[in-house]
Image (cartoon, rainbow, N blue to C red):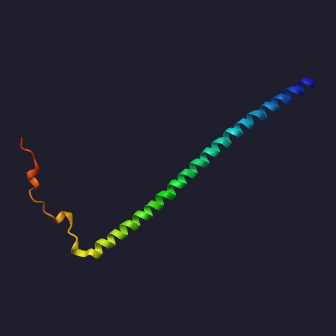
Amino acid sequence: MCSSVQKALFEEEDRVKKLQQKVAALEKRNKQLRDRVKKVKRSLRQARKNSRHMELVNRKLSEKLSSAGGQIPYINSLKQENSHGTYLKV
């Protein structure tokens, strides 16, 4: 009877060891995922910050353009002289 108890004890210890290994693997994966989430959140915050900054820059640029009125000629309205003279003759 002593051997059957020892066998059961060894089996239980083996089962505990396997469960501990699974827990360690899951904890490691959980940490990896948490770190990944932190990086994604940081990237999202940075993207939002950049977006807000670009909106502000665009708004200021629009205000400058509207306040300048007709003083700034648009590139499309400018006529380039001799624009066709730059081609090479073959």
Q: Nearer the viewer, residue 55 or 22?
A: 55
On the rendered image, what quadrant is the N terminus found in? top right
Q: On the rendered structure, is 80 left or right of 6? A: left
Q: Residue at x 85, y 29 (%)?
A: 8
Q: Position of residue 25 (x, y in %)?
A: 67, 38
Q: Position of residue 67 (x, y in %)?
A: 29, 76
Which quadrant would residue 7 be assigned to in this image?
Answer: top right
Q: On the rendered structure, is 39 left or right of 18? A: left
List the single residue furthest toward the right. Answer: 1
Q: On the rendered structure, is 49 left or right of 37? A: left
Counting every numbered tag in the picture gives 0
Q: Nearer the viewer, residue 25 or 64?
A: 64
Q: Residue at x 22, y 73 (%)?
A: 71
Q: Nearer the viewer, residue 88 or 25?
A: 88
Q: Residue at x 32, y 70 (%)?
A: 62
Is residue 55 visible to the viewer in this orientation of the structure?
Answer: yes
Asked if residue 18 is positioned above or below residue 27 in the image, the reply reads above
Which quadrant would residue 14 be assigned to in this image?
Answer: top right
Q: Position of residue 29 (x, y in %)?
A: 63, 42
Asked if residue 76 is positioned above or below residue 6 in the image, the reply reads below
Which quadrant would residue 3 be assigned to in this image?
Answer: top right
Q: Residue at x 12, y 60 (%)?
A: 80
Asked if residue 41 is positioned above or below residue 72 in the image, the reply reads above
List the single residue furthest toward the left. Answer: 89
Asked if residue 78 is positioned above or below residue 88 in the image, the reply reads below
On the rendered image, what quadrant is the C terminus found in? top left
Is residue 1 visible to the viewer in this orientation of the structure?
Answer: no
